[in-house]
Amino acid sequence: MVPADSETEPRRRPRRVYREGSEPDPRFTLANERTFLAWLRTALALMAGGVGVEALQAAQERTSPLGTLLAVVLLTGGILCSITAFVRWASTERALRTGSALPALRMAPAFGSGLAVIGVLACIFVLVIGF
Amino acid sequence: MLSERGRSDRGSSGHRGHSGPWDPGLQIERTTLAWSRTALAFVVATAVVIRLLAGTDVVLAAVCAALTLPLVVVISLLTWRRYRRDERSLHREAPLSDGALPGTVAAFTVLVGGLGLIYVLAN
């Protein structure tokens, strides 16, 4: 195993991920990368939902506070999701390098219940807008 | 670079000089396809945001298009370069690519979300 800070190793970013530990099994690194990308696509889906709600309101030529709230919640959720996706990728990669336990998926309960709230809001929104 | 389990899991078909893929799990190919799906999702999301922004403010929509769409092309090109580099690295048992591209793409996603928020609040 080549030490992480060997002079022969190219500088890799972010430094806080690569300054410790040694190279893990590449399959795990690549699986971590695919999980990160899946979270990014989830974030994009949330954002598309937010913009879609606003577009629906614009098409109906009526704006309800509930619809705007739903759009803002979806877009903010998407932004938070993409930030936490990268933070999680970095901490998982670091854990793989140091051989420590993988970070717990703390946001999973919040994400699940948040999606449930969004679903309820969307139902109310559809009923209010009159579909 | 691979753990002992990783090496033994490759099996006879995984060694160079034998038939079959070098990496039986096709890890790099699957990861590159995941990158492509994400780039495609970006194109769809940015196109939708730009189209909707055009209804509100044409100049803002043009600026957003000029900022985001070339970036999607750049990300796609970097993804394929990453694929070739990682494949070479796997053969040489060298380290895989770093987190620069994932970090950039995450920041780009935040930018797309910000554009969406501008659209909602401008309406």
Image (tube, grey):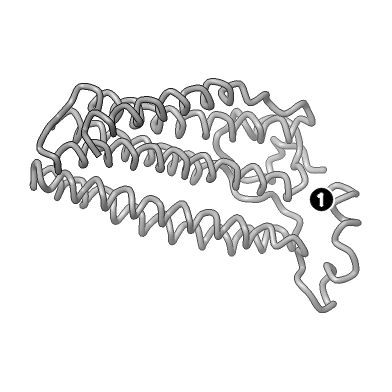
Location of residue B120 by image quarter: top left
**Residue A85: where, in percent of width, then height?**
52, 34
Q: Is residue A54 left or right of residue B86?
A: left
Against B9, residue A20 (above or below) is above
**Residue A48: where, in percent of width, then height?**
33, 42
Residue under label 1: B2
**Going 69% across and 35% down the picture, which residue do you hit?**
A5
Q: Is residue A54 left or right of residue A83?
A: left
Against B19, residue A130 (above or below) is above
Nearer to the camera, A15 or A76: A76
Name the amino acid, label 1: Leu
**Going 60% across and 47% down the picture, which residue do you hit?**
A34
Nearer to the camera, B102 or A1: B102
- Chain name for mark 1: B
**Which secondary structure lies at badge 1?**
loop
Q: Is residue A118 left or right of residue B48?
A: right
Location of residue B104 by image quarter: top left
**Residue A90: where, in percent of width, then height?**
59, 32
**Going 67% across and 46% down the picture, which residue do you hit?**
A31
Nearer to the camera, B19 or A106: A106
